[in-house]
Image (cartoon, rainbow, N blue to C red):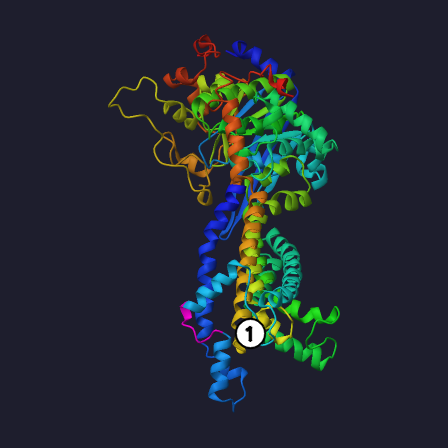
Amino acid sequence: MMEVLDPQTREAATAEAVLAVTGLDVDIRTPTGTVRVVGNVSFTAYQGQTLALLGESGCGKSMTAKAIAGLLDPVASVAGGTVRLEGRDLNAMTPRQRREVAGPGLGIVFQDALTALNPVYTVGSQLGEAFRIHRGMNKKQARAQAIELMRRVGIPEPEVRVSAYPHQFSGGMRQRILIAMAVALGPRLLIADEPTTALDVTVQAQIMALLRRLREEEDMAVVLITHDLAVVAEEADDVCIMYAGNVVESGPVATVFSSPTHPYTKGLLESVPTHARRGDDLSSIPGSPPELKSIPSGCVYQDRCPMAAAICRQERPELRPTGANQFSACHFSESLRAGATATPAADSVASPETPSTLQEETR
Amino acid sequence: MLTYLRKRIISSALPLVVVVVGVFALARMTGNPASLYLPLNATDAMRADFIAKNGLDQPVLVQMADYFGGLLRLDFGTSLRTGEDAAAMALRAFPATLQLAAMTMVIAIVLAIIVGSAAALKPNGVLDRFASFVSMAAASIPDFWLAIVGIWVFAIYLGWLPTSGVMGAAAWVLPVATLVMRPFGALVQVIRGAMVTSLSEPYIKLARSKGATEYRVVTGHALRNAAAPALTVAGDLTVGLINGAVVVETIFGWPGIGKLMIDSILQRDFAVLQACVLLTALAIFVLNIVIDVGYALLDPRVRPTAGARARSKARAIAPGPDSTTPGGPAVPAAAGANA
């Protein structure tokens, strides 16, 4: 079983770790008290690979991304843990050092390109801004760089369009501009926060292809935040599944999707409609995630878990290894592992690139 | 731009006519000038002679037709009081009002940008609460009260400033300080609100993600977006100063159009009053066009011509959204051809 996964494990081991997050906590101050929205999150993103943060809305994945990028809202703050970008602790930096990293070290792509772009400036001046800030270029040089970037991300007639305003572009083109901005200074890490959520399906595929091409060209580490299982299956090397601010399972995508060792992952995969017929009920996880104010003291998933037992109410499970590079925060991960059969859902979300024999052999 | 101007001129012509008709009719309801300009013991013959000479014996409609006929020949009538050309009197008084308004607005805008932006940096912080209190107070204090208290304290009690007139820089202090209050208070509130909104927009995070300094984020990105709503309010407030500084001009003896207007109402100097109103209305009309143009400059989304041009250009380049790059980012080979 280990042998089958070996190629991937070795790759992960030799590839340079670009981003290492350990025990990250994020708190939000509310009028009624402090709420922990991200708790004890750890993961590592490797050069040239994509790590997906997967979870429902409100599970803390975007908050994790903002904490890494240092873009938390004033009410939120990092309460613990370390975020290391190429070995340098981002949280220990002064604001000035942090600004120096923002752009050359770390780029971020936001979800909604229309609101993320400043409506009163041309895309050219916004694309060129990074060069003016970090490379001290003048307007003309920055504009030339902007045109080059626009050409690189596939915007037609960049010499003309460089003077246009964000509202004069289509949604897909705006997202391309946003991506161009994030990679402008060749960052080592690209965080893509639901980059395709606001787009229609055909454009989504183009944007994901663009991200993949840029990742290969720049040899960046990519942290992809999404709630889309199919996107994770197709694009990511590793996946971190988050629930109520905690990582519940992590590991290589192929392994996690073919043999989940956390009941939440299992539930997610089973919710993917596969061979559903008209009239059949679609499978879903009953209930809804807990309110962040009232996360239970034991396992975060206890209220919706079909396997919940007494220990789940008393003790929060730590992330424990359950396979090659696979980790799960469940008291019963071993029994899940033992009973792991390739769920039908895994077939449907697994991409063509995922060798289907893998599932057979890992069993 | 020219089409826009033409449209604006046509649409403003009617309100302008209505204003002139209204003032014309209302002024004549204040009474007959004859009883003011002739001595108390004037004979009926003298009275009739004065009325006939100034055309006041005609029906109001005929007088009005005469007046509009004169306007077409740029004849605004003559002052009953001085016999001078009414338009010349109004034009002579107007610069004093404009200077006062300009000085007031420049100071109010600069102060409001500083205070409003600073308050918006930490909503509900100490500074924000203080600014909110000060701006509320400034916007609510009646200007006639402030003017009188100002004169009493600084001109009479302390003797630092003149009570009235336009001689020297010191004479500007009290009128400007009085007039600044309301626009300052109103603008602080508007700029603070607009800055709080724009500082919480995602484009601020994008600017920070590029490593922009806090100064650049606040002034370059947030303030630039807050400018358009602030301009609209500043425009309205300027209008208020151009036609509404009557009280302050009267109190400080400022020889502006507001004082001239009051004087001509009191003295039933109809031609001068009408000339003043017409001039003020024209100034407001021009100011509104300037505000509209300024707004379009500040916010590219409302630029009618530029937007349409770029959109048609965009259509020529890409027939549909993203359709030129099917299946991924194909770099257009001939993109550099149009240089």
**Residue A21: image location, x then y, percent:** 61, 31
Residue B276 seen in render:
yes
Residue toward you, B13 or A5: B13
Q: Residues within 10 Å of mark 1 (few under 14, many from 20)?
A: many
- Chain on which label 1 sits: B
Residue A249 shown in magenta = no
Q: Amino acid at mark 1?
A: Ser
Vertical comparison of A18 with B280: above or below? above
Mark 1, residue position: B264
Picture layout, residue A23 above or below residue B327: below
| x and y percentages locating residue A306 in the rendered image | 36, 30
| Residue A172 at x, y percent in the picture | 50, 26
Q: Main secondary structure of the magenta part?
A: loop
Q: Can residue A184 be seen?
A: no
Which residue is nearer to you in this view: A67 or B146?
Answer: B146
Residue B57 is covered by the magenta coloring = yes
Picture coordinates of residue B69 (x, y %)? Answer: 48, 61
The span shown in magenta is: B55-61
Asked where in the image residue B333 lies, by quadrant, the reply is top right
From the viewer's perspective, is residue A3 above or below residue B30?
Answer: above
Q: Secondary structure at mark 1?
A: helix
Closest to the observer: A146 or A45? A146
Give the number of marks: 1
